[in-house]
Structure formats: C-alpha cells, structure tokens
Amino acid sequence: MKFTSLLASAAMALGLATGAMAQDKTKVGFVYVGPVGDGGWTYEHNEGRLAVEEHFGDKVETVFVESVPEGPDAERVMTQMALEGADLIFTTSFGYMDPTINVAKKFPDVKFEHATGYKTAPNVSVYSARFYEGRAVQGLIAGSMTKSNIIGYIGSYPIPEVIRGINAAYLAAKEVNPDVEFKIVWAYTWFDPAKEADAAKVLIEQGADVILQHTDSTAPQAAAQEAGNVITFGQASDMSEYAPMPRVSSIIDNWAPYYIDRTQAVMDGTWETVNTWDGIGDGMVGIGEISDAVPADVKEKALALKDAIASGEYHPFTGPINKQDGSVWLAEGETADDGTLAGMNFYVEGLEGEIPQ
Amino acid sequence: MIVLEKRPQPSKAWSYATPLVAVIATMVFGGILFAILGKNPIEAIGTIFWEPLFGEFAFYYRPQLLVKGAPLVLIAIGLSLGFRAGIWNIGAEGQYIMGAIFGAGAGLAFYPLEAWFIFPIMVLAGAFGGWLWATIPAFLKVRFGTNEILVSLMLVYVAEQFLASVSLGLLKNPEGFGFPGSRNLQSYESAHNAELIAGSGMHWGVVAAFIAVIFAYVLLNRHMLGFHIRLTGEAPRAAKFAGVNPARLILFCLGLSGALAGLAGMFEVSGPSGVVSIDFNVGYGFTAIIVAFLGRLHPVGILLAGGIMALTYIGGEIAQSQLGLPAAAIQVFQGMLLFFLLAFDLLTNYRIRAARSEVA
C-alpha cells in the first residue's frame, strides 16, 4: 500500500508538473512486442506513432520501447513511461493485458490503451481491428487461385483472434472452391523469422500453393518466393516489396487515425474508456493493392466483397454455418454476434484438425 | 610480433581483474557503438548504469533490480556448482519453465481455497519440477553416457511445448474467454508470492537467492561435497583417487541446479509474472549462464554479476525510451559483456609477450 501511495504521489507530482506544461506537450508512450523493423505488426504501430508526431507536431512528444517481453518486463516499461510523465500509453500486444491493468491501477491519471485485449478499467480502453474482414477477402482470392486446392496457414497462437481469421478465410475460400483444404501450422510466436520460414516451407512441401500467415515477419514471403508458384498475402503491413509475386494482396493495419483521435481526446480532456473494434468500413483494416498476378475476374470479385463488407451489406460470418462437429452455429441468413466472435474458440465445419488445447 | 605464453600458474590478479576490465571495455566499445548510432555515448552509458540506481525514479528501479536479478542469481548459483565440476547444465531455461508449471499447477489445484500451506506446497512442487527436468539428462548421462549439454538443451524445447500445452489446456483460465494463460496468481492470495515489504521488491524469490548464495559459499568452502566438486573440475584424476563418486556428483549437481531453476520459475510465476502463459519464459535460464561466468563461478561474484546484468536490462529500457536507442543495440551491449569477459579471460592463463625476432 505504501508503495502504491508513493507511486501515486509521484504520479501526482508529475501530474502537477505536466499539468503546468500541458499547454506545450502531451507525452504519448508506445510499448511494442517486436522490433519496429519487423515489417509487420509492430512496424504498423510505429507508423501510427509517427503519424501522431506528424499530426500534432510540437504539441506532442512520443516515446517507445521495442521488443518488450510479455510479463513483468512489460509492467516495468509501462511504469517507467508513466513515471516519466506519459499522459497516454498504448500497449500493443495481447500479452500486455494484465500488466496494463496493474500499472493503470497505480497511475489513475494516466490513460492506457491496450490492443486486442478484453479487460478495461476507468483509465484503460481496449482497441482492435476486425482483421477477419480482410481474411474473408484473402480467402476468396486464395480459394480462387489455388491449383493444388491446399492452402497453408501459419497461425501464431490459438487465440480467438487467430481462429477467427482462419474461419473467415476458410469460409470465403470454400464459397468459391468447394474442394479447398486448409493446413494449419502453429508457430507459437508473433515474430520469429526462422520459425515462420520453417512453417512456410513445411506447408509448401505438403503441397500448399497459397500461404496465409498470422505472424509478423516477411520470412514466409521470402520462403514462398524461393519456392516459386506460391502466393502469399502481406500481414499487418503491406509487404509490397514482395509484390506482385508471391505477395498478391495484403491486410494492412491502419492505426494512425485511432491514435490521433485518442491523443486528441487526451489533449481535450474528453478521453473515456471505450472498446473499439473497427474494420474495413472505418478504415482500420486496409486491403493492400491486389497485384496483377491475380486474374481480373477474381480481383473484381474480391473488391466487390471488400466493398460489401465495408458498407455493412455483407458480414463474413453469415449463416448457414455449422461448427466443426456438425452442430448448427448460425442459421440461414443469421450473422455472428460480436460476443461469440470475440471469444471464438471453435473451427467451422470443413476445417480439419483440432485447435491445440 | 606478439606471442601468447602460457602461464605456469593461472594469474590470481587477472582472474579478479577480468570482470572489471570486461565491464570497462564494454562501456568503451558500447559507447563507440552508441556514438555511431548518433547518440551521446556518455549520456547513453550514464543512463544505463546511473539512472536505475541514482536517477530521479531510483525509488522504483532499485527494487526492480532485485526482481530482475533474483531469478538470474538463483539459477546461476545452481549452474555454477555443476560448471565447477565440469558438468554442463545448459537447459536451466527448461527447468525454470517446469518449476513454474509445477508450482503454479500445485497452487491452482487448490483454487479457490485460502490456506497457509498452499504456498509452501507450491515451493516444493516448483523445486521438484525443476529437479525432475534436470534429473533426466543426469540419469541418461550416468546410465548411458549421453552428453548432458545436448540433452538438457533439447529438453528446453520440450518444456516450451509443455508450457504451450498447459497454457492452452490444463491450466487455462476458465474465465479467460478462451484466451490462453492461467488464472492470475497475483489475485489468489494464498498462492501469491507478494512483496514481503511493499515497494521493496523483496519477494520470497529474492530471499531464496540470498540464501542460495550463502549456502553455495558454505558448501564450496566448508563442506566435503564442495571440495569434491572443486576437485573434480580442477583435477579429475585426483578426484578419482580421492574416492569421488562421479555418478553421485552428476546427479547432485544437475539435480540441485534444476531444483534452483525450478524455484526461480515458481517464484516468478507466483509473483512478478502471475500467469502461466505461452510466453512465460524470457530467457533467464540462458542469461544465467552468462551471469555464472561473469561471476567467476563464485557465489559472491554471481551476486554482483546478477546485479550488473539486471542493471543493463533496466537501464537499457530507460535508454530506449529516453534516448530512442534501439533494443538491438542494448542486446549487442549485453553480448559485448560476455565477449570481453571471455576474451580477457585469456590473460588469466596466458601472458602477452613481445616476441624476439629470431634469426634463421
């Protein structure tokens, strides 16, 4: 208790100090799980940070720490940022959830934003993007273009977000190609180029000619390029350096508008706890340019699907959909509710294998 | 021309001086590296070594040094005993993981019961988990003559798979919305390895680390077993004549280092970390190898080395956020420390001489 009050008083002292300087600078901290040069997830968060700097110029100061392990180290990094006077801290990995909540308790005047988690507090918001909408577009292209009818999928961790992506991609692929089959490899990492490359190679050896990845590095792209005749999609970032082949399109996380918005809210004193989950329509999920390697008719269909999702006309999880065990999940015309999607822990019918338990 | 000449006796002076020289050399070359990256080297080095100890927020960082250093010291002490006897346990990371799984598992088995005996049971379970994992390579070495370096290292990867498995299955938080990871032991009072004095960083793991240092010191200097360990490392033949039982020594050294690594894992999972998750392990088991050597395999040295290592971690993070140094530069900096230590170690056994030019 003593420590908490000590921290609180330090925070308060700083709060007064920063309050005095509030006219000039708002300090925004970012905690990254990978290096900013990963070319994927962390790269895009850092782009968001740079956008905040550019947008607010002298009114804002940003700091970041990269490659922070999920656990006590993350807690220390966040505390350090809060002590040094950060007004707003973005913690950008699922595993930062409990540390974010812990630190937020000690610094009630600092606002926290945790990406992809589900625990909120008076000074902790959560935000994520509906990546699965992009997965549906990928699935359509993948299902149309595969010749071997085997699509390889590199999963990071078997958490709802990743399972949702697999299901969305599979449903869209099967829609255009009933014979399609998914092979899934779990890498148990967000960022490990060597492991990701191995996973891609294993999938290619097993006959996959499309590789989807839910990991952050460009290593699978490189592996596919080496193998030739394998297509891939950029993950989190455009990865356009691998276009037009193997990378035929991508899902791009666009955090910049959100980060600018939230920073503005802190400056205006209007910041509130929110639970944001935006998709293609709100611009948080972008679809990278579909390259010329994709036939024109497929490209047209993919863009039509993208537009339908963006306008809200079509939901990637629209019934009839059965669960893997054959039981009914969604009836004809029914769409999935956000609660089920948020905690998705089952495969849809047709996917083989089990979710690791 | 410069030649290396083997010393008849290892130099005592150099064996004490090399860690210091290595730290200084790391500062110099690290400073050059930071300068190349466009940062003020004095400021960067100052931030890393000064800020956590005497900076504005030292009241927060000093306790954190204990939190970060304790598992390193605890593991390194165990490793050093084996290393002294020429028994190479490289798999402390795996033993650390197993200790955490066993410890947390034992605690969670009682959830939500609150009772005083739960934490002691977890401590025993954690030590047992680590001991068990280290005894596998020990047994295989004694029985079949396998190489303990390889077996213990490979078992790290097996332990990581176990960790992923229990995070997703056996120990998964039933109230976690399908996300992997166990219940948070920090909010389960009987199983929580809380700070003994709030704000001091002192948790049971830190206490255990200090006890281990004293225990190892007494063992090595006052006990027959310690003498056997040293003898086996320094003169294996003499050890044989002195009646040292190599099989027993292997089982003891590996088992003890495993138990200590297991304890470290258990204290970490029940305290600072709180949850068994897929990414629970962050390399303490491997970093402890550096700490053991940086500390000259001497208990007191290891204590200091653990402190320095923790300092570079915490100072490194501060340097990242304050000065914008990349994480990779900090890692290179830490790597330099081991490199220079090993390089200057040469001077313990060799001396540098200017060779006389010989006439053919």
Image: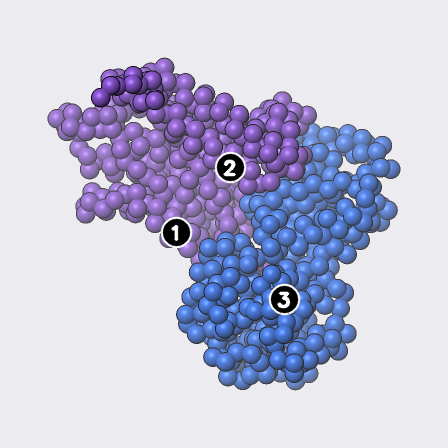
**Coordinates of residue A70 in the picture (x, y in percent):** 56, 47
**Coordinates of residue B96 in the picture (x, y in percent):** 41, 42
Amino acid type of the residue that numbered disc 3 sits on in the rendered structure: Ser
The purple-coloured chain is labelled: B
Dot 2: chain letter: B
Q: Are marks 1 and 2 on the same chain?
A: yes
Residue at position x 70%, y 34% in the image: A83
Colour chosen for chain A? blue
Which residue position holds label 3?
A: A250
Which residue position holds label 2?
A: B332
Residue A126 appears in the picture as rendered = yes
**Colour scheme in use:** by chain
Dot 3: chain letter: A
What is the CA distance from the residue labelled 3 to the residue labelled 1? 33 Å
Which residue position holds label 1?
A: B157
Please tell me which residue lies in front, B132 or A168: A168
Amino acid type of the residue that numbered disc 1 sits on in the rendered structure: Tyr
**Coordinates of residue B208 in the picture (x, y in percent):** 44, 30
Residue at position x 84%, y 33% in the image: A21
The reply to whether callout 3 and callout 2 are in contact (CB within 8 Å) is no
* Crowding at mark 1 (Cα within 10 Å: few <14, some 14-19, many 20+): some
Dot 1: chain letter: B
Q: Are marks 3 and 1 on the same chain?
A: no
